[in-house]
Image (spheres, rainbow, N blue to C red):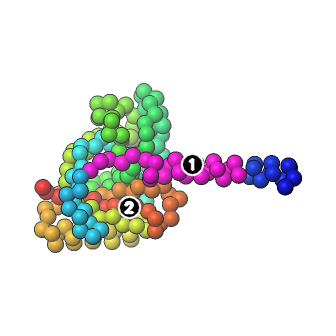
Amino acid sequence: MKRPLRLLLFASLIPVGLVTYFLIKNSRAATASPVYNVIRKSGSFEIRDYPALTLITTPMRNAGDDGSSFGNLFRYITGANIQSQKIAMTTPVLVDTESEGNTMSFILPASMAMADAPESSAKNVTVRSLPAARYAVLRFAHGNDFAAREAAVARLQEWVQSEKLQQKGTPFYGFYDPPWTPGFLRRNEVLLSVGK
C-alpha cells in the first residue's frame, strides 16, 4: 500500500475512533448508578430498597420536554453552579410526569451529600433529597415514548395490586441510556413507592 493511501486510511480512522470513544465513555456501562438492594424478583418485576438520594431537579413544560430539561441539568453538572464545580454524570435520569408538575432529575453521585451539592446558578434547577424508600420496579425496553411509558405503568400497578402491596405516591421513570441507543437495547424503568 502506498504511503499517501495509508495516511488517508489512518486519517479516516481518527474520527471513527473519537466517536467510538465518546459513545463508550457516555454509555450506561461507564456511568455510576445508585446502589440498591433487591428484596424480591418476579420476572420483569422487582422490589428494591434504595438509600436516600440527592437530586438536582428542573421543571418540564410538558411530558415530552426532554431536551431543554436535560440541558438545564447537564449545564449544572458541567459547572453552571455557584462553585463552578464539575460533577460526574450518573444514571438513571428520573422523569416524573404523574405528580404535580412534570420534572426531570439527575441523581448526584453517592459520595456527594445534599449539604455538599453546590447551589445552581440557574433558578430553574434545584437541589433536593429523595428519602430512602422501597420501590416496586418494572424494567421495559423499547423507546421511551408515551405509549410505552403508559403500558409499563399499567403493568406495574396491576402487579402491585395483585401482590397486595401498598402503593405510596405516583410512579416515575428511570432512563439509563443515551438517546442514540437503539430502542430494543434500552434500559427503561418505571418505579412506584410501596410500603415495607
Measured along the vertical axis of the image, is residue 148 above or below residue 180?
below
Three-letter amino acid code of the residue under disc 1? Phe
Q: Residue at x 40, y 61 (%)?
A: 187
At mark 1, the secondary structure is helix
For disc 2, the marked residue is: 188
- Is residue 1 left or right of 58 when viewed as pictured? right
The quadrant the C terminus occupies is bottom left
**Residue 34 in view:** yes
The circle on residue 22 is 1
Q: Nearer the viewer, residue 117 or 170?
A: 117
Three-letter amino acid code of the residue under disc 2? Asn
* Marks 1,2: beta carbons within 8 A: no
At mark 2, the secondary structure is strand
Q: Is residue 28 magenta?
A: yes
* Residue range of the region highlighted in magenta in the rendering: 13-36
Q: Is residue 23 magenta?
A: yes
Measured along the vertical axis of the image, is residue 154 above or below residue 169?
below
Q: Residue at x 32, y 55 (%)?
A: 96
The quadrant the N terminus occupies is bottom right
Per the picture, the main secondary structure of the magenta-coloured stretch is helix
In percent of width and height, residue 148 lies at: 38, 69
In percent of width and height, residue 51 lies at: 23, 45
Q: Residue at x 23, y 64 (%)?
A: 41
Measured along the vertical axis of the image, is residue 57 above or below residue 154?
above
Measured along the vertical axis of the image, is residue 82 above or below residue 89?
above
In percent of width and height, residue 181 lies at: 50, 60
